[in-house]
Amino acid sequence: MCLDVEHFAKAKLMTFITQSDEDGYSIVQEHMTLPPTSRFYCSKERYNDIFRKAEKNDYCKDIYIKHKDDMPIWALIEIVPFGTFVNIYGFVAEKHSNKPMLNEFYILKDISKLRNACAHNNCILNDLSTKTRKYNPSYDITRDLSKHTNKDVYQSKLRNPRIYQITCLLYLHKTLITSGLHDIQSKNLNTVINYMFANSHYYEDNSRLKSIFDYFKKLVDFWY
């Protein structure tokens, strides 16, 4: 699902740029020369490292070699890591005063952390404590959650960075993707939920885990 969001976010960014008066080449130079004070900053050293790796990558080197002397945005987003792409997404959104895309930028930042954890096969559920994250969730997400569940429930859950990142993924996947892919992932998610509760007697004395599983089931029920 992280890969789904990444793909459709790239498609949305490219659609926005091609339908605007934005120049696909100059926007790259603008992002590369942002000052360190910018929240969308990516250092020259970081870009150089990305390009070095792209030149050696079997899947990226042809794109990089073809465009290295004058890189357009549609080539750049194919070779940068997801985190760098997210910064570019936010930069374009702010430059054009696109508030919905800017809100998505903040959600994508948290999804990029979850994507990296999935890519590295990290243990997702090894810390489910409720007070390890400063409570500063997306307003779009909390507004939607408030329609379906108690405020005290989601406030306590979203203080955990892992739970918040998964919530971000489920929310943005259902808002960003309108194709049949959403229906496919809906079936997959319901399979996961069934696995969660298949042996619920194993953790019947673990109130925290039960509460979190119940929370995820609610998300899937009303978003998918």
Image: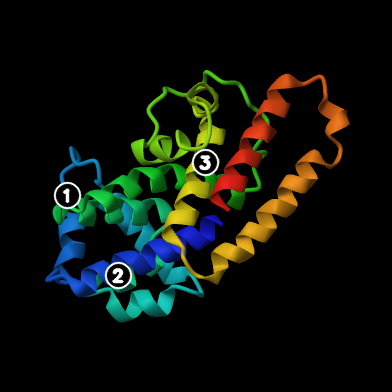
Amino acid type, label 3: Thr
- The tally of labels here is 3
For the question of whether residue 71 can be seen, the reply is no
Query: Which element type, helix, strand or loop, lies under badge 1?
Result: loop
C-alpha separation, residue under disc 3 versus residue under disc 2: 26 Å
Q: Which residue is mark 2?
A: 14
Amino acid type, label 2: Met
Number of other residues with Cα within 10 Å of mark 2, as a class: few under 14, some 14 to 19, many 20 or more: some
C-alpha separation, residue under disc 1 versus residue under disc 3: 31 Å
Seen from the viewer's position, the closer of residues 14 and 183 is 183
Amino acid type, label 1: Leu
Number of other residues with Cα within 10 Å of mark 1, as a class: few under 14, some 14 to 19, many 20 or more: some
* Residue 205 in the figure: left or right of residue 101: right
Q: Which residue is mark 1?
A: 34
C-alpha separation, residue under disc 2 versus residue under disc 1: 21 Å
Q: Nearer the viewer, mark 2 or mark 1?
A: 2
Q: Earlier in the sequence, mark 2 or mark 1?
A: 2
Task: Give the number of the disc on residue 9.
Answer: none
Residue 49 image offset from top left, x and y in percent: 37, 56
Q: Which residue is mark 3?
A: 167
